[in-house]
Image (cartoon, rainbow, N blue to C red):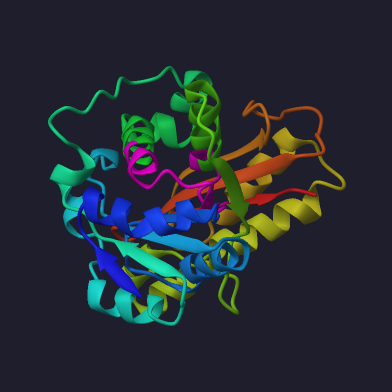
Amino acid sequence: MFTYSTRVSLESALQEVRNQNGTIGFVPTMGALHEGHLSLVQKASNECDAVVVSIYVNPTQFNNQEDFLKYPNTLEKDLELLSEFPKIKVFVPSSDEVYPKDDSYEPIDLGQLDLILEGKYRPGHFQGVVHVVRNLLQIVNPHLAYFGLKDFQQLAVIRKFSILNGDETQIIPCETLRDSSGLALSSRNLRLSEKEKVDSLIIYQTLLKIKEWRLLHSPEEVKQMAIDFFNDGALKLEYLEIIDGTHFVTLKDQWTTNGVCCIAAYCGEVRLIDNMYCE
């Protein structure tokens, strides 16, 4: 495994792969790696000749500065975990590399995606996501890029950007990994105490209840039942919405074949998100 900090050094390392018409995969991360990240890396390794894993905590996607400052930094451990994968090239850039002075990025119109759910509660977040992903894709220029479905709306934003930008990189969605209790794996879980991890299971339990209730009730009815159920737990709910997973419109009277429930909540100071298809 090799580690690179500059665009020039990474480009040089990837040139041999390109000369041999090899396939380059890309897994962008903000570090604090867990089994969910590693499952993306494994999938990319299975499908590509070389895989770039970036580790960069992007400040432009945090609308809460305190959240940015408290984001876990476990670089030494991250590199140790990645050393198990033989095809990996780790890119650990500075902000000057990611956001050069001649950066030509211009914000794009994300439409509805920038106004609902995460877009509503974290203004500016998705523009920051699109900006950093665009710049990283320009640096790495991969054939395939892998993103987790736990950030369901973020994946939709990246897909929309890719289409609007005419980007040739194929976006590969990857299933959410959960621990044995059902808690979705997240770097933010490192900030939870053992009791808080137990308290956070109300998210998963609510998602399962929604799948059960949908057989007898409308989306609007299920949403209220789910909110009542959730509020019996210890977390503070920010939003719970049942949407069409393609068009991101709220479901009310009728279920669609790709209904998704998205939840955001606070466990103490830690903000957690999760989602699940309702079938």
Question: Would you identify the image quadrant in which residue 139 lies?
Answer: top left
Please say whether residue 67 is visible from this viewpoint.
no
Residue 101 in the image, given as x and y percentages of width and height: 12, 31
Residue depicted at 31% across the width and 51% down the height: 11
Q: In the picture shown, does residue 220 fall above or below 230?
A: above
Which span of residues is magenta-colored? 135-154
Quarter assignment of residue 77: bottom left
Residue at the image position 49 percent from the left and 67 percent from the top = 185
Image coordinates of residue 227 in percent, x first then y, are: 58, 47
Q: Is residue 64 magenta?
A: no
Q: Is residue 136 magenta?
A: yes
Pinpoint residue 212: horizontal percent, then vertical percent: 79, 56
Q: Position of residue 140 (x, y in %)?
A: 38, 47
Above/below status of 191 relative to 134: below
Task: Give the residue displayed 43% in from the left and 64% down from the top.
Answer: 186
Identify the residue at the far right of this view.
216
**Quadrant holding the N terminus:** bottom left
